[in-house]
Amino acid sequence: MVILGYVRLLRSRSVLTLWVGQALSVFGDRLYAMAVMWIAFEESGAFAMGLVAIAESLPYIVLGTVGRRIVGRFGSLKALAAVDVVRAGLVAALPLAWTHLGLAGALALVLVAGFAGAVFDPNLGALTPELVEKRDVQAVSGLMDLSGRIARIAGPGAAGLLLAVMPMTTLFWLDGATFLVSAAALALLGRRGPAVRRDRASAPTRIPAQARMLLRGRPDTAVAIAIHGVGIAAHTVALALPAFITLQLGGGAGTYGAALAATGAGALAANGLAGNLRLPPNLPAFYCLAWAVSGAALVAIALAGSVPALLALSVLLGAVNPFVQVALVTHLSGFPPAHRLRLMSVDLTVIRTAGTASMLFVPALAAHRPSLAFAVAGLGLVGVGLFGAVLAVRWAPAGPVPGQEPVGTGASGRARGR
């Protein structure tokens, strides 16, 4: 079974320590995401929820655009442990800030927490491949994606249950505790050092002069990152799914919950395949094609005439997601550490910008004619994805790129290497 690749990876103490710490941290992120929106609505209304969403994304856009040197200063596991300690304090203090300082004080804390996340996320993504052999980069990318998938399913439900039995402040303190666990895991790894590829993992991370130079040198990578932004923007139409269910299928909240559960189930089921099966050598082209398949699923949802059809398509839509995530992370992991960090930071900037911008108008436009919105978004994503795949094939390097490693061999590649 392909999932055995994950089991083998988790036998490594370094990978197990990181995965457990980050699984709790990501779970805490989901608790925080729901709790902060709930307290924003409860204390200041729906308008505050929009301000919180913008405050969370703005730091990623700013640092990804003009903060490359700041991000580069946190390129070690010990530095990331310190960032998680700061995030724990910020999260724990948030309800107190809202009580004593009001909306402005709470938004300031959310903004600072966003900056902490904006330096943490790309650095962790850039350091994780250094914990494993080159042949296992795809599998460890899938393993980290798995923790995120589980958290997306369990986090909101757990937050709802916890809010029923404990005060809001306690929930934020619990969330802060998950960041402290992550900080302890990172500090332990930083002190012990990665078990594999120690020579590279201990090297200082230096940001290249400009991302523009990297993207010009690898236009196929630039295409993949651009398609990522388009895909995130197109999938904002999913926020109109309740309207679609009500107007076209005559369903209600139960159907909406079932569709979300089906999407999550599809993603979990496909994760083991995405992390362990051999992916095509041209990962940017494969990545663009995967987004095209996702767009086709959106078009099919627009045509769905029954709840069973919607649930089946939701499973398909979810199943594509791990392949999208693992393919891009595996591709970017093949770059030297400093280049990898810069490209991952650029990717985060692109998707945060696209997601924030599309949130401002797509849900409102889609609410009145949701089936048309799903069709337009899906067809647009299919066209852009196919065009991106053609460009990625055309602009693929003719031979090995100096400094870039071939990764993503998957389970079959490991079998042949023995």
Image (cartoon, rainbow, N blue to C red):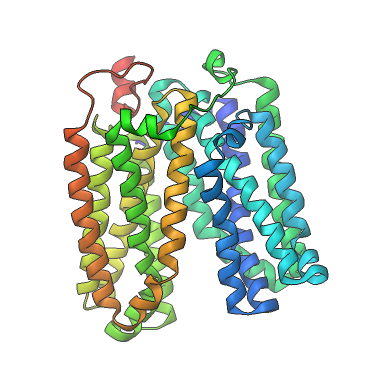
Say if residue 4 shows up in the picture. Answer: no
* On-image quarter of the C terminus: top left
Asked if residue 326 is positioned above or below residue 244 in the image, the reply reads above
The front one of 324 and 216 is 216
Q: Exactly how many numbered labels are in the figure? A: 0
The front one of 375 and 319 is 375
- The residue at the point 72 percent across, 52 percent down is 176
* Residue 21 x, y percent position in the rendering: 63, 40
Asked if residue 205 is positioned above or below residue 362 in the image, the reply reads above
Say if residue 157 shows up in the picture. Answer: yes
Residue 172's image quarter? bottom right
- The residue at the point 18 percent across, 35 percent down is 393
Q: Is residue 59 left or right of residue 242?
A: right
- The residue at the point 31 percent across, 26 percent down is 409
Q: Is residue 286 left or right of residue 209?
A: left
The front one of 315 and 29 is 29
Asked if residue 236 is positioned above or below residue 132 in the image, the reply reads below
Q: Is residue 343 left or right of residue 222?
A: right
- The residue at the point 58 percent across, 45 percent down is 118
* On-image quarter of the N terminus: top left
* Residue 82 x, y percent position in the rendering: 72, 37
Residue 397's image quarter? top left
